[in-house]
Amino acid sequence: MDDKDRPDGIVLTEAQKKSRRQRSIAIALALGVLVLLFFAVTLVKGPAVLNRPL
Amino acid sequence: MSVVDHNAIELSPRISEAVVADYIALLKPRVMSLVIFTALVGLVIAPGHFHPVLAFTSILCIAVGAGASGALNMWYESDIDAKMTRTANRPIPRGRITRPEALTFGMTLAFFSVMTLGILVNWFAGALLAFTIFFYVVIYTIALKRWTAQNIVIGGAAGALPPVVAWAAATGSLSVEPWLLFLIIFFWTPPHFWALALFRSDDYARAGVPMLPVVAGPDATRLQILLYTIVLVAVAAAPWPLGYFDAVYGVTSLMLGAVMLALAVNVYRNRQGRAALRATRRLFAFSILYLFALFATLLLEVVAHALAPLVFW
């Protein structure tokens, strides 16, 4: 194979690509849940959301 | 001629092939399920109205905090996990996840669980959750586990705190009832883990963990199991005569306690061969059922009280 045909940098294997994609989806879902959680609690507490007793 | 040496790819950084299941394994899901259940009971028996969304948030944060503790525990203990049959399949010894990855994962979850509980529910509960994680990771895992045979006695406090955190989340304060739940789990921990340590003592000895059967021998451990079980049964029944929990709980607690005590006596008496192994395994298995049934009784009582007006209307 000619040098110019070789891809630059690190080339991921199929297994690495698959696991990275799976981890990315999991992180996205976790962030989505966090956003929904903050939104839901804001609706529940209303203006009192800023009132956090010690 | 190429400037880039393609052979250098051999020296490139390790690229993870860890899948989501490996990270879930880091959270110790079975421990987490017990934490969720005991925290749920702490939440449900707390007085006053607690909005379901806030209740869900609290349980989620406590569960994630417990998972963070598990990940940080596996980060620190990967060397001894690799030596023990029971733990050799964990993600770090298997090479699925590196120690720095586990540390980052655990610290991130710990940070988000504590901050979310503090911001969305209350800071008292958030601080208690932070203390629980700190106690499990620093006091139990790092300081006690490799140093003293009393590791799981003192460290058991971390496992006993979730219902206290949940009560604090629901009420913003603490009273006697959550501490009763704390004491039940606290005195349940030694008989449960020492039963496990009795039939896994070779594993612990190989890893150099000074569990009681390794340090003091199996007979001394059997005596300690019996003594702690006697205290456990008394502590678990005490809330009934003290007037904190009612007769249904009291009678259930005494019946379950009688079985637990009988199994502990069996462990104490059977010291040789297959009978000894069978007695120890039975106690270990029943101890899980014992704690679950005890807390389930409290949960069912609250549900029954809540449904009673609807049924009798």
Image (spheres, coloured by chain):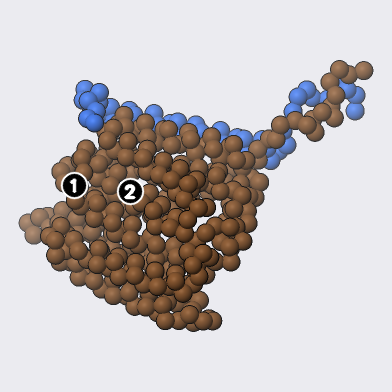
Q: Residue at x 20, y 40 (%)?
A: B173
Label 1: chain? B
Quadrant that contains the C terminus of chain B = bottom left
Query: Which chain did the image draw in blue?
Result: A
Mark 2 / mark 1, whichever is N-terminal:
2
Same subunit: marks 2 and 1: yes
Q: Is residue B246 visible?
A: no
Q: Which residue is under mark 1?
A: B175
Name the colour assigned to chain B in the rendering.
Answer: brown
Q: CA distance from mark 2 to mark 1?
A: 13 Å
Relative to B16, is A42 above or below?
above
Mark 2 is surrounded, within 10 Å at the Cα level, by few (under 14), some (14 to 19) or many (20 or more) other residues, namely many
Label 2: chain? B
Q: Position of residue B87 (x, y in %)?
A: 57, 56
Q: Which residue is under mark 2?
A: B161
Relative to B34, is B273 above or below?
below
Q: Amino acid at mark 2?
A: Leu
